[in-house]
């Protein structure tokens, strides 16, 4: 079998196995983009073909070109909805679902998402500033707050523990159990519980709750330009969750690989990147939420255990700093970050 036929066979197998989108699958749609742009099928994505290129222009327009370089979508980001991520509100055109096992490779202003040698997606960012990128990092001080939230529904890290020592770290993993669901959630509530590491980007094995009553897990990656998450997998209350972030040799280069797994149904979902190394890392344990109006919208206490932060197999000294957002503490009862040890942290709520 020649190399061209082999490559075609790999691509076709990938498309069939994980539900990727072929060019012919795109139909005319309302140009108001409310969901993540993705080369995958699914209820929670806006599908684009495998091999598409997303271009963010300085004038605030996002264009999508198909694999044959044909323009298939052009939208003004001002008309695109902001959607929540574990790193803040982001324009939907800057959020992308990719299959589990995808590797993100960024060079300059261009990021490519690969799976088994197939380029699923290319993102080119010509934006000049954070605001141009569609990432909601600033707030108007005169904007009214609603129970610790801004009127646009903005969320934030409500309570967390952080170690900002900027150590060299090549491994961080931990366990937590899916807590009790919010007792009386509003329609749009979203809660995130995760461990994370940050340097030039943020990597996060994430447990997510939505107001539909569903808990899901996914691996997230934010590079400061666009945000990527792996396929979301369902989990149940009481399931044990294991998040793992590991910097490892991948045969020809070093890469970060992070996975979130549940022992309940055995689901696992992963993302890889080679965008940064293991130097100057900070680590977190966090609870973040969006569209909350009171204690009925937040989950029960979450205990994170066996928090292992290492370099070359040796424990790294950790100095956890507990932080509770003061605005949220005014409206949510019993918020508390209880630190038992370097290995064990509980994020407490009224539930």
Image (cartoon, rainbow, N blue to C red):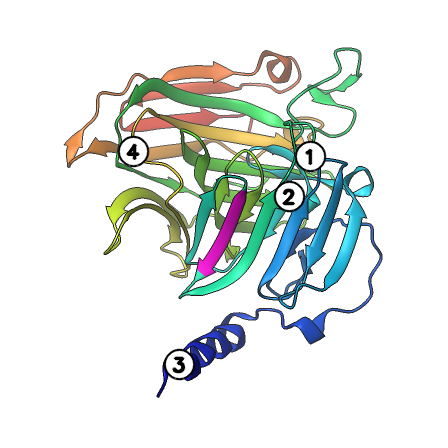
Q: Are marks 1 and 2 in contact (CB under 8 Å)?
A: yes
Residue indicated by mark 3 = 6
Picture disc at residue 94: 2
272 left or right of 11?
A: left
Few, some or many C-alpha atoms within 10 Å of disc 4 (few <14, some 14-19, many ≥20)?
many
Residue indicated by mark 1 = 134
Residue indicated by mark 4 = 278
In the picture, residue 340 is in which quadrant? top left
Q: Say which element carries label 4.
A: loop
What x and y, as percent, mark residue 308? 25, 34
Q: Earlier in the sequence, mark 3 or mark 2?
A: 3
Q: Are marks 4 and 1 in contact (CB under 8 Å)?
A: no
The secondary structure making up most of the magenta span is: strand
Magenta part of the protein: which range?
Answer: 110-114
Q: Earlier in the sequence, mark 1 or mark 3?
A: 3
Q: Earlier in the sequence, mark 1 or mark 2?
A: 2
Q: How many marks?
A: 4
Q: Say which element carries label 3.
A: helix
CA gap between label 4 and label 2 equals 26 Å
């Amino acid at each position: 079998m020649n190399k061209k036929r082999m490559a075609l066979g790999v691509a076709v197998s990938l498309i069939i196995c994980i539900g990727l989108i072929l060019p012919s699958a795109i139909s005319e749609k309302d140009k108001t983009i409310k969901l993540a742009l993705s080369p995958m099928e699914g209820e929670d994505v806006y599908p684009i073909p495998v091999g598409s290129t997303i271009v963010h222009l300085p004038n605030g327009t996002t264009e999508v070109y198909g694999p044959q370089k044909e323009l298939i979508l052009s939208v003004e980001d001002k008309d695109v909805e902001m959607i929540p991520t574990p790193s803040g509100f982001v324009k939907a055109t800057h959020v992308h679902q990719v299959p589990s096992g995808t590797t993100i490779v960024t060079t300059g202003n261009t990021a490519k998402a690969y799976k088994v040698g197939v380029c699923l997606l290319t993102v080119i960012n010509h934006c000049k500033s954070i605001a141009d990128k569609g990432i909601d990092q600033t707030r108007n001080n005169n904007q009214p707050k609603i129970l610790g939230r801004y009127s646009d529904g903005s969320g934030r890290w409500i309570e967390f523990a952080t170690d900002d020592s900027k150590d060299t770290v090549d491994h961080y993993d931990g366990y937590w159990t899916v807590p009790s669901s919010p007792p009386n959630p509003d329609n749009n509530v979203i809660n995130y519980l995760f461990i994370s590491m940050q340097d030039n980007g943020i990597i996060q094995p994430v447990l997510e709750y939505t107001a539909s009553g569903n808990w899901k897990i996914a691996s997230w990656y934010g590079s400061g330009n666009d945000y990527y998450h792996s396929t979301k997998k369902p989990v149940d209350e009481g399931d044990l969750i294991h998040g793992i972030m590991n910097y490892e040799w991948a045969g020809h280069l070093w890469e970060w690989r992070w996975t979130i797994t549940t022992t309940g149904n055995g689901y696992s979902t992963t993302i890889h990147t080679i965008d940064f190394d293991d130097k100057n890392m900070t680590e977190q344990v966090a609870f973040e939420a969006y569209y909350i109006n009171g204690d009925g919208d937040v989950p029960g206490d979450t205990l994170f255990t066996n928090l292992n932060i290492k370099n070359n197999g040796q424990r790294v000294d950790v100095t956890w700093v507990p932080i509770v957002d003061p605005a949220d503490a005014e409206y949510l009862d019993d918020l508390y970050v209880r630190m038992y040890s370097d290995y064990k942290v509980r994020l407490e709520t009224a539930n």
